[in-house]
Image (cartoon, rainbow, N blue to C red):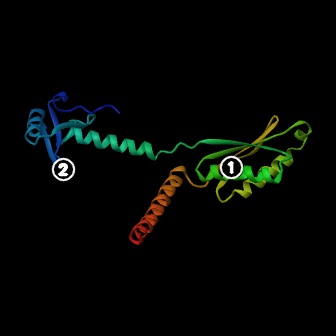
Amino acid sequence: MSEPRINERIRVPEVRLVGPNGEQVGIVRVEDALRLAAEADLDLVEVAPEARPPVCKLMDFGKFKYEADMKARDARRNQANTVLKEIRFRLKIDPHDYGTKKGHVERFLKAGDKVKVMIMFRGREQSRPEMGMRLLQRLAEDVAELGHVESTPRQDGRNMTMVLGPNKKKTETRNEQRRRAQQAAAKAEPADAEATEAG
């Protein structure tokens, strides 16, 4: 976003002036608008340069810029980057290994990340894609409360892949974790206070 023109950089004969509290002053000569800004110890800021005449507002430009920067920073902080995690399975997977890998998938989904699940076929296993399909469907059913299938299983050479997406957005998950941490801290404080009183 380009920075608006302020004060002497506004080079038009007239402007539509808006007061510091949003009140309409009307169309005035730019010299008068600059004088009013100086009297009020404010800046004359062009807010709608395309309008005819351009719309200018009396405001504290430094404060306005600071608030805009803070809003942009908050927006960036709340924007979560979803990561695509990858986990690999073998067709003949041991039940214990399956449980461990399923635990990883659940952890990734709880954190709000997408998971790409891949089955690697070896040798003759390539002639049994339906077994890979069954394994992926079983996994999808096992983690259904945390995630959903975003792209259905499909074979790509020796591999079969499926993408699971989290049911909760990453920002929701992060906010929930913050809330839990605050509640835990609030519960811990009274216990600390009681311990000091007892001691």
Q: Position of residue 36 (x, y in %)?
A: 9, 40
Quadrant of image for the N terminus: top left
Residue at point 51% right, 56% down?
Answer: 177
Residue 35 at what x, y percent from top left?
8, 36
Q: Amino acid at mark 2?
A: Asn
Horizontal arrangement in the rendering, residue 57 relative to residue 147 (left or right): left
Pick the front one: 78 or 88: 88
Residue neighbourhood size for the residue with mark 2, other residues' Cα within 10 Å, grouped as few (<14), some (14–19), many (≥20): few
Secondary structure of the residue carrying tag 1 is: helix
Residue 22: x and y in percent read: 20, 49
Depth order, front residue of 165/102: 102
Which residue position is annotated with label 2?
21
Measuring 89% from the left and 44% from the top, which residue is drawn there? 128
Q: 84 or 57, which lies in front?
A: 84
Label 2 vs label 1, nearer the camera = 1
Q: Amino acid at mark 1?
A: His
Q: Is residue 58 left or right of residue 75?
A: left
Residue located farthest toward the front when viewing the structure as drawn: 199
Position of residue 26 measured from the top left corner of the image (x, y, whole percent): 14, 44
* Callout 2 secondary element: loop
Real-space Cα separation, disc 2 to disc 1, in angstroms: 55 Å
Q: Give the side of residue 184 with respect to residue 20, left or right.
A: right
Determine crowd level at label 1: few under 14, some 14-19, many 20+ residues with C-alpha closer than 10 A. Answer: some
**Residue lying at 58% horizontally and 50% vertically, measured from the top left:** 112
Q: Is residue 51 above or below residue 170?
A: above
Report the residue marked by disc 1: 104
Q: Along the horizontal axis of the image, is 68 left or right of 25? A: right
Work out whether 172 lies above or below 163.
below
Mark 2 or 1, nearer chain start: 2
